[in-house]
Image (spheres, rainbow, N blue to C red):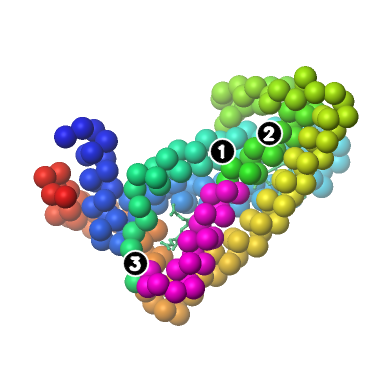
Amino acid sequence: MKLHDHVREWALGYIREGKYSPVGVWFHWIMAALVLFQLGFGWAMSRVPVGGDKLAAYSLHSQLGLAILLLAALRFVWRLFIPDPINDADAPGWQSTAAHVTHVLFYGLFALLPLSGWAMWSAIQPVAPLRLAGLVAVPAMPFHTLSQEWQFYVLAWAESLHLWGIVGLSLLVPLHVGAALKHHFWDRDDVVIGILPEIEDDQNARDHARYNPQAG
Ligand code: HEM
Ligand code: HEM
């Protein structure tokens, strides 16, 4: 059996039990934390007066944003190979459709926000190179070859896409979290349990029972 078959089988062991795999779980919580931070920090950053502090804030904001783009791409590839678990709430109906649409929109926004941010920086020809998570230099998109007028259009478009993305996220996050809380406390089903990390003892015991590369 090849390595990726082992990995898939390991992840499907969790999915069959109605849980996201630890990879899916950590993608979810790391990205949720980063995206929420970006929303709050981006808003605070826009209120800092022009100067050194503002530039430092822009720099941190773009470094984290580009890290979100990389994580989103990895998460998307993971998601193509590993389906989401079927849980109690997956009966056909508008709620399942709404949940599915929300997840697709989230993935779209995880790409739109960093790409529009990157385009904004590229249209103003950044003074310092952009860096992914502060580590890897990321080149500007090639807008410097355009006329000044077009650079201005790109900047204006990218800025409004960024703002629409922010509006979208700010609407979707409370809807999504509200739905999760409703499932957990009102319907008392297993939806939220499926995305929570497993407790160590529980996990060890179940890994033995679950992991069987010969099956499936
Ligand atoms: C998921 C990722 C991101 C989120 C959630 C996000 C969120 C935000 C927020 C909330 C603002 C403040 C808007 C305002 O109040 O005016 C903002 C502004 C900004 N963001 Fe992002 N951002 C993300 C990624 C990025 C990336 C990757 C870059 C650059 C490479 C970037 C560049 C900018 C810039 C330049 C502004 C200032 C725009 C202006 O002043 O009009 N963002 N962002
Ligand atoms: C307290 C906060 C949160 C809770 C309780 C929560 C809960 C959940 C639950 C229970 C699921 C699984 C739904 C299902 O299987 O149908 C899920 C999936 C998802 N959540 Fe959240 N979430 C939270 C915050 C966020 C935030 C802030 C974002 C976006 C930045 C987000 C993005 C997603 C995405 C994209 C999925 C789909 C996962 C996939 O299929 O790959 N969540 N969340």
Cβ at disc 1 under 8 Å from ligand 1:
yes
Say above or below: 173 vs 70.
below
Nearest the eye: 34 or 91? 91
Cβ at disc 2 under 8 Å from ligand 1:
yes
Residue located 55% across and 70% down the image: 178
- The residue sitting at the right extreme is 149
Query: Looking at the image, can residue 37 be seen?
Result: yes
Range shown magenta = 90-109
For numbered disc 1, what is the local secondary structure? helix
Identify the residue under disc 1. 69
In the rendered structure, the answer to whether residue 9 lies left or right of residue 131 reads left
In the rendered structure, the answer to whether residue 22 lies left or right of residue 69 reads left
* N-terminal-most mark, 1 or 3: 1
Distance between mark 1 and mark 3 Cα atoms: 28 Å
Instruction: Kindly identify the amino acid type of the residue bearing the numbered disc 2.
Output: Trp
Residue located 34% across and 71% down the image: 88
* N-terminal-most mark, 3 or 2: 3
Cβ at disc 3 under 8 Å from ligand 2:
yes
Instruction: Kindly identify the amino acid type of the residue bearing the numbered disc 1.
Output: Leu
Label ID, residue 118: 2
Residue located 49% across and 38% down the image: 73
